[in-house]
Image (cartoon, helix red, strand yellow):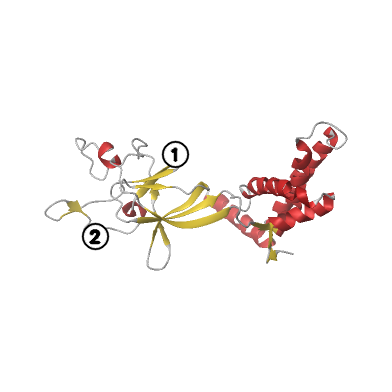
Amino acid sequence: MSQQRQWIEIDEVVNQYLDESEQPNHKYFKCFQIAFRGLSELGIDFFNQIKSVKLPIEPNYTVQLPPDFLNYTKVGILNGRGEVIPLTYNNKLTLYAQQSPDRLSKTQDNSIWDWYSWDSPVWFNFWNGYFYTQMFGVPSGSPFVGSFKIDNRTGVLMLNENYQFDYIILEYVASPTVGEVYRIPVQFREALIAYMAWIDIRSLPTTRRGALGDKRDRRSEFYNQRRLAWARYRPFSLTEAYNFQIENQRKSIKS
């Protein structure tokens, strides 16, 4: 069995389904493609695969997102302890000229005076002879590291013009890619087998093998196994129940 701790390869699950349904080996590729779709169906909701990459900054302060990017979890730089210092998401950054090499010159209007924006929570209270700054130096924190905005349509991450580093650390939810080895928690094995059993006959015409009732039953079985898998994967312990009760009591006291 190709199992590593609590994880099992989808190749093993496909072979188990072929044995259970008594199908020949030449059906493997078809069933693997179905299982691959099931991996996306289950993984997006439950056990997302998180990837972490170090990406270079383009001269126009943009970054090309990886092809398998679905959504970000962290965007930032590294500190001396190997931690990610996150950037802030900036909805004010424009999508205009994002593919242009001179994006910054096209998206700035120097005729409008903007002193780190009036809505900034930072106090600049010391005149150093040239401009106002903080008396005790620039504080740490994401607003001073930089800000970013993502355009999912074009797959571009844009940075503000004050960004001073030549890379970003991007941690993101990855979409499954054909050709890579994937594992799922063993709790989801039966759910993935039920998904293959359903999709295997879903598009067949209504005959004895593709009966409407059988399709309906297999679909119901998949969603039932999906529910059970999630309950087994994230069991609700007595400690969680106790902490949940204590937190509710604290909220009721505050209110």
Residue 96 picture location, percent across and down: 34, 35
Question: Which numbered circle lies on residue 137?
Answer: 2
Q: Residue at x 82, y 39 (%)?
A: 217
Residue 4, compared with residue 47, is above or below; it is: below
* Spatial separation of the CA atoms under disc 1 and disc 2: 38 Å
Secondary structure beneath dot 2 equals loop
Please tell me which residue lies in front, 9 or 93.
Answer: 9
Residue 86, compared with residue 102, is above or below; it is: below
- Other-residue count near label 2 (Cα within 10 Å), few / some / many at <14 / 14–19 / ≥20: few
- Other-residue count near label 1 (Cα within 10 Å), few / some / many at <14 / 14–19 / ≥20: few
Question: Which numbered circle lies on residue 35?
Answer: none
Residue 212, compared with residue 83, is above or below; it is: above
Residue 167 picture location, percent across and down: 36, 56
Please tell me which residue lies in front, 123 or 171.
Answer: 171
Residue 184 picture location, percent across and down: 67, 56
Residue 147 picture location, percent across and down: 36, 48
Q: Residue at x 27, y 37 (%)?
A: 106
**In the current view of this chain or complex, which residue is farthest to the top?**
206
Q: Amino acid type of disc 2?
A: Gly
Which residue was labeled with disc 1?
154
**In the current view of this chain or complex, which residue is farthest to the left?**
129
